[in-house]
């Protein structure tokens, strides 16, 4: 079975995040996209999302590594809901490394050209329902 084209897109986004190549990353976002930066903080628009990813990279001392695990894609009406495991590795501030897995949710829209663009990026997934908001 072939993997969904969105897996390759998301994996390329992960590589761009890890490499701090935010220009390449933004090529995969719709102009009006939304990013859940953390519970209670959502930014919209490509420029704000780009700035948020740069700030996130700074926060993790430019050592954030993002990879994907299991993925399910549900398509309908030109949109796709992606439910997947997002695996994160970053420094713990004491010389070690933290490894964590989130159950993320993403929404992509397929353009008339056939290209997929991210419209909602929520690496926290449904855990937002139980998160403390700022």
Image (tube, rainbow, N blue to C red):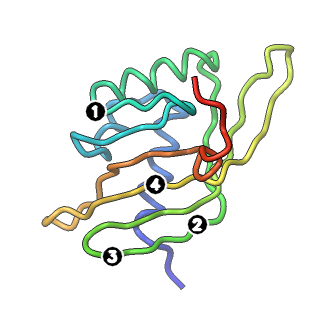
Separation of disc 2 and disc 1 at Cα? 25 Å
Separation of disc 4 and disc 1 at Cα? 16 Å
Label 3 sits on residue? 76
Residue 5 position, x and y percent, is 40, 68
Q: Residues within 10 Å of mark 1 (few under 14, many from 20)?
A: many
Q: Secondary structure at mark 1?
A: helix
Label 1 sits on residue? 46
Q: Could you tell me which quadrant the N terminus lies in?
A: bottom right
Q: Could you tell me which quadrant the C terminus lies in?
A: top right
Q: Secondary structure at mark 3?
A: strand
Separation of disc 3 and disc 2 at Cα? 17 Å
Separation of disc 3 and disc 4 at Cα? 14 Å
Q: Nearer the viewer, mark 3 or mark 2?
A: 3
Residue 59 position, x and y percent, is 60, 16
Q: Earlier in the sequence, mark 4 or mark 2?
A: 2
* Between 32 and 86, the one nearer to me in the picture: 32
**What residue is drawn where x is 31% and y is 67%?**
79
Label 2 sits on residue? 71
* Between 43 and 91, the one nearer to me in the picture: 43
The quarter of the picture where residue 50 lies is: top left
Q: Is residue 112 above or below residue 90?
A: below
The quarter of the picture where residue 95 lies is: top right
Label 4 sits on residue? 106
Residue 122 position, x and y percent, is 50, 45
| Left or right side of 98 for 76 | left
The quarter of the picture where residue 130 lies is: top right
**What residue is drawn where x is 38% and y is 30%?**
43
């Amino acid at each position: 079975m072939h993997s969904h084209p969105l897996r390759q897109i998301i994996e390329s986004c992960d590589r761009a995040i890890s490499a701090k190549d935010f220009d390449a990353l933004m090529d995969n976002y719709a102009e009006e996209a939304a990013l859940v930066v953390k519970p209670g903080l959502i930014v919209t628009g490509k420029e704000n999302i780009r700035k948020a990813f740069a700030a996130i990279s700074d926060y993790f001392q430019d050592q954030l590594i993002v990879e994907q695990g299991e993925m399910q894609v549900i398509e309908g009406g030109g949109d796709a809901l992606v439910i997947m495991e997002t695996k994160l590795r970053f420094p713990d501030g004491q010389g070690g490394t933290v490894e964590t897995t989130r159950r993320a949710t993403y929404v992509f829209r397929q353009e008339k050209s056939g290209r997929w663009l991210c419209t909602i990026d929520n690496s926290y997934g449904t855990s937002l329902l139980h998160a403390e908001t700022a």
